[in-house]
Amino acid sequence: MRKILLSLALMIAVHLPGFTCAQTAVSTEIAPTGKLRIGMNASTTTLVTRTADGNVRGISVDLGKFIAEKLGMAYEPVVYASAATWTESFGKGEWDIGVTGRNATVGKLLDFGPDVILIESVFVAATGLEFTHASQVDRTGVKIGVARNASADVFLSRTLKSAEIVRVGGDTSSAIDALRSGNVDMYATLTENASIVAERLPGAKIIPGVFNTVGFAVVMPKGRSSIAQTKLTQIVNDAKAAGIVQEAITKSGLKGVRVAPD
């Protein structure tokens, strides 16, 4: 019903005088510098990865280009190397939209739009440690590494009863160093990130079982109007309907990722 009402409202609007000016005003509100700056957390490899020539590719890139085209603006990636630098950018006006995990901490700093993808979260255990299932890790003496303020941090801080949380840098190297050094027994992260850690650290293994499924949504700085938010929601849903997001998932060969429903 919501989609039908939204479509009717937009159909009516396009036939109203001044619609083109209104549309331009909405685009300018979303991207006030005249170009659409897409904030990207490069440590979340499910969303964006570096190419050999130093550029970036992935879901955030393809979606960002689609949104920029629909707004009639140039596209500009603003890339952050770690989860820490990404979260530090919130509220600083360095970018116009981004894609990040939906959680209460981020919700206090940014406005969430529609979900783009759903991603499974898993544990990767250090070399020599064996756990038969994710449901068995919450034990006294077990140290679980997380990227500070990432979705795993927010979720596990709320749900763990006995295991200890150890916050580390959000990049892959930090996760591997923490596991190799014994500072943590396992690292909690998205499936794709866990696969990379397990591949690069001999003997590390992904523990069977998913401990959480996270919605990754488009975000905007606080204060954008409901009209701007509705416009962005329409474009994101159009991108999903057009297969832009699924194609990006397929091209990247992502694990544990699916397109979020509208």
Image: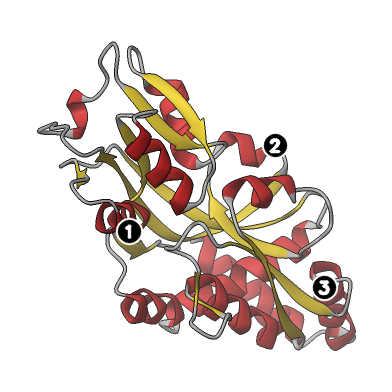
**Residue in the foreground of this view, choosing between 62 and 9:** 62
Q: How far apart are marks 1 and 3 (CA)?
A: 40 Å
- Amino acid type at circle 1 is Ile
Residue for point 52% across, 46% down: 170
x, y (%) of residue 145? 41, 33
Image height check: is 145 above or below 12? above
Q: How far apart are marks 2 and 3 (CA)?
A: 23 Å
**Which mark is first along the chain, 1 or 2?**
2
- Amino acid type at circle 2 is Lys
Q: How far apart are marks 2 and 1 (CA)?
A: 31 Å
For disc 3, the marked residue is 26
Quick one: quadrant of the C terminus? bottom left
Residue for point 31% across, 53% down: 191
For disc 1, the marked residue is 196
Residue for point 49% across, 80% down: 51
For disc 2, the marked residue is 108
